Image: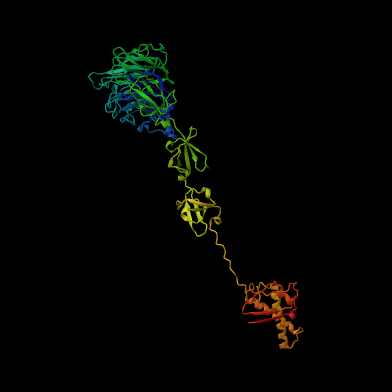
Amino acid sequence: MISAKTYICGDLGSVGRIDNLVGPLIDISLTPGGIVGGTGYLLLDIDVDPNNANKVFVVGEGRCDNLANPAANFYGIGVSSNAGSTWQLPGGNYQTIMTPSFCYHKWYEVSIVDSNVIYICGRKEQATNKGTVIKSTDGGLTFNKCNPLPSTVDGMDCTSIHFTDANIGVVGLNNYAVKTTDGGVTWTVLNGGASFASTGDPVGQITGIHISADETNIVAVGFSRIIKTLQVPPGPSGIALGSWSTVMPLNNNSGYHLTAFDDSTMVMGGYSDTIMSSSDAGATWVSSNPLPPTTLSGPNRLAANYYKKTVSTLEGFYSGGTSLYNTLSGATTIPLPPVVVTFPVQIAAVATWYDESVPPTCYLLTPCGSGSSIVTNTDLSGYIGSIVKILGNSGCFTVSISNTCSGAIGVIVASEFVSCLACDPKCYLLTDCEGILPSVLVNNDLSASVGHVITIHGQSTCWIVSNSPGCSGSVSVIVDNIYTTCQDCHPVCYKLVDCNNNGNLIITDHDLFLYVGKVIKLEDYGNVCWTVENIDNCIGSVPISPITDVFDVCEDCLPNPPEPKEVTLNPRRVKPGYYTPGCSPEYTEHTNCSFSDRVYNDMIGVRYGIANCCDEKDTDKWDIKKQLLDMKAMFDPEMCQSACFCNCPCPTDVTVLLERFYPPMPCTPPSDVETSIQIPPGECPEPENLHVGISI
């Protein structure tokens, strides 16, 4: 079973991937993958970790002068550990800005030694255009500058690089090449320190370079020719002046990338329909044409790469402008599927990770919800354990390794998520317990709180949680607490005041909403009546016993006062004769006043000799009337009443006023009082004829 991943790159931050040598082409460009600033720049080279098909490096142009938004800066290098699904900017001092007003990077080529050591060459020092080599020893997490190149090559871009191991490598510049044997600590200018142009081999800008593992052979490709040096046994290896020679001139400045399958087999792409290959360590080269079109004025074939070599066959990918071809033997037109893959921009580089020893591995896409599982032979090793969406399917799937490849199909991953909920969010509606605030639609996972009540961080409002059929306009919230009911979340309390105003008070969170303004009795408080009132806090709240009775007002609830006892008041007063029911106040007053007046007149006559014009008997008459009144006041008037025994109407003369107030009824006087009234029968006597005798 073949396992392969092919990567291509070009302008505008564009990167693509083909899985297992068959389509479709998957867009893994920098911008969708996470490097926003990389979208506008030309990418010049791409390579893949020999031990990990998902670890890929891409290099090219970058600017870092966006001082207002540093996150938009792109330093020309992108690294992915998941086959291009996401990209990261590596750290390190290669990002140091020398000229902030115009910060520019341009990395031409990457050379991967192993999973830890990676070299990149290009131009970093904008102020001097000094070529720079950077190195990573942590698998591409960080890149730091190697020691500066010799002053001989100051002001030149490093446009090609190749390392055989962590220490030995060569770098190509404009008509110069340098070598290190200590991992970039020190550098030596090859060709005796002289320019290739000065020794008769004007290779120009070296766009591809390769050194053999035994350091005996170096091949360099430039715009105008291919040159090499060979020295056996190993020694300075090309350092001696004049040890280099031209192998083959190139027309139309066509030399570009040089890719070596091993120290013997190499392939070179170039401008103007140029593809050349060598099977003898660069000693001889043949054209890989005819590939469509067949003229030298055809499309630029900047990318060329072998991924498989047999005795008679070389298999690899070649570019033609915006198209990518997979061919056999280089010189044939027999395509392997896909016949042509079209890229949105001109293809600048291609690299393939290939292995036939890997047993067939397929992947199972299990739906998060309802639906059928999918078995795919697309390499989803970078998505195991993740949740993905695939093109042409709206579902969300969990990725795992399948124990079978039966019925496997190819898929394209559209997006990746950390959970099924993140892929297909379920939303929930929050309703204010008090019905005042508008409802809130949230996309948090509140499945465990449906039907309960929550509080949100920074708010005191209590919210009822329910399912929502949609998520349009949803927001995320932070849940503080979960309650069973609204009452548990935000208890409402009430105040009970004793109707007797004796200071008794109860605060309770018992639901008394229906009793506010009413009067209640409680089981544990007997006949105490409580007025129910609202209160704005629950401090000191206590439970209460059941309600036994309800009233509208305190008066209805309080016990009725006892019936008043009948009290017999003593009608006597200090002054006899008053408040005597048998005689009217007018009569009593008249009698008392008349008696006093006669006594006074008598006293004046005796003392001062003033004669009274009234009859003497007049004083006696009023004395008798007064004595009768006083006697009557001494006894209960209801038990002993004087009576007027005449049946005729009593005269209005004041002398008989006393008789007017007594009905004709017998009266039994007390045993110790003898009263005799002599009244002629059948008539009401005049006062002078009334004789009363009293003996005690």
Looking at the image, the residue that sits furthest to the front is 681
Comparing 217 with 239, the one in front is 217
Colour basis: rainbow
Q: Identify the residue at image location x=52%, y=42%.
A: 435
Observer-nearest of 609 and 126 = 609
Residue visible at 46% across and 41% down in the picture = 453
**The C terminus lies in quadrant:** bottom right
Q: Quadrant of residue 314?
A: top left
The image shows residue 156, relative to residue 265, as above or below, that is below
- Name above or below for residue 119 compared with residue 606: above
Decide if residue 86 is in sight here: no
Count of picture labels: 0
Residue furthest out toward the left:
233
Residue 668 in sight from this viewpoint: yes
Find residue 424 and report its horizontal and vertical position in percent.
Answer: 44, 30
Quarter of the image that includes the N terminus: top left
Nearest to the observer: residue 624 or residue 222: 624
Residue beneath the point at 75% across and 78% down? 686
Camera-nearest residue between 315 and 687: 687
* Residue at (65, 78) in percent of width and height: 631
Quarter-of-image position of residue 266: top left
Q: Is residue 457 above or below residue 556?
A: above
Q: With 308 as the anchor, is 448 left or right in this view? A: right
Q: Position of residue 695 (x, y in %)?
A: 65, 82
Image location (x, y in percent) of residue 82: 36, 27
Quarter of the image where one finds residue 353 = top left
Q: Residue 546: percent from the left, percent from the top?
A: 47, 50
518 lies above or below 107: below
